[in-house]
Amino acid sequence: MVLQAVASGLVLGLVYAGIGAGFSLIMATGTERTEAHMRHYVRLLFGLIAIALALPGGAEDGNVGVVLLHGKKGIVPGPVGSLAQKLKGAGYLVATPEMPWSRNRIYGASYEDAMLEIDRAVEGLKKKSAQRIVVGGHSLGGNAAVGYAARRSDLAGIVVLAPGQNPELPRWRERFASSVTHAKEMVAAGHEDSIESFADFNMGETFYSQASAKNYLSYFDPDGPAVMPTNAAGIPSPIPILWVVGSKDSATRPSGYAFDKAPSHPKSMYLSVDAGHLEVPAVAADQVSTWLRSLDQ
């Protein structure tokens, strides 16, 4: 970490200057004062060393890029905004793209096409010198981070914050059965790009969203591409995963739901914080920053 190295170098420079000054003073004084001054400079030496060791680390020369994905019907950056600012302040390169489940673009592209949009955000960070990439997201964005890791093999890690969208769960199957069946009939009839109103759900509220049959199915088909347990199990090789849930979030699932299905990695962590669904990114910001720093250790 360049900033840490510079700061540590300054402190150590003061250490050496202090030692030099101490010996000069000792040579210039009598024997009676020698031991007192030596004790003084030894204390100064250890104090400055302690300060150097305590200096916080950051993203080394800005070479770590973090893509943060907002949740369903969100705006950019939404609840991930405060986390994005914290990470930028720590030296990370951060992108917060508008995804095809935002308030303005709801299901404007399929789940699979969303992976290509994440690719573009990743490439943008690499053009800014990012050498390692972490993809994170909140709610449906967290779901997409898992999906992206299952489809790409060059990630430094993923951060999953209060993940949502669970089309394979029995309650979801029942709630959306009619819309899913209708969308499948439309696709079979060659009308996959036709726009209609389909049942939707977010934050405990059921409503209807306008979408093409093809795009709708990509998010709601219980056997489709947005199933988190399947995607977690499909991550091709072990990578660090920080999976954060809220103790006050009704959408929280235990680690066995999907986290435990991913390939094991020593730096992976399942964490519960005292927060509701929307508050998880902000409440967990310090833990996310600390975890990201641990990837360099």
Image: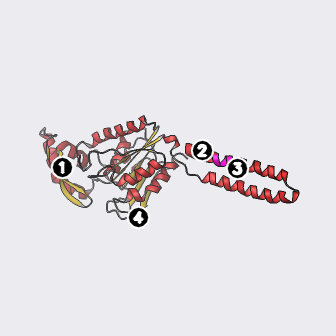
Mark sitting earlier along the chain (3/2): 2
Mark sitting earlier along the chain (4/3): 3
**Residue extending furthest right?**
31
> What secondary structure is marked by label 4?
loop
Q: Nearer the viewer, residue 29 or 160?
A: 29
Q: Looking at the picture, which amino acid does disc 4 mark?
A: Asp
Q: Are marks 1 and 3 in contact (CB under 8 Å)?
A: no
Residue in view at x 23 percent, y 49 percent: 220
| Tag 1 residue | 180
Q: Which mark is residue 15?
A: 3
Q: Looking at the picture, which amino acid does disc 2 mark?
A: Val
| Tag 2 residue | 6
> What secondary structure is marked by label 2?
helix
- Majority secondary structure of magenta residues: helix
Alpha carbon separation for disc pair 2 and 4: 37 Å
Q: Which mark is residue 107?
A: none
Q: Which residues are magenta?
A: 10-17
Q: Looking at the picture, which amino acid does disc 3 mark?
A: Val
Q: Looking at the picture, which amino acid does disc 1 mark?
A: Val
| Tag 4 residue | 274
Q: Nearer the viewer, mark 1 or mark 3?
A: 3
Q: Nearer the viewer, mark 1 or mark 4?
A: 4
Mark sitting earlier along the chain (2/1): 2
- Within 10 Å of disc 4 (Cα), the crowding (few <14, some 14-19, many 20+) is few
Mark sitting earlier along the chain (1/4): 1
Up/down of 192 relative to 43, above or below: above
Residue 206 part of the magenta segment: no
Residue in view at x 55 percent, y 51 percent: 56
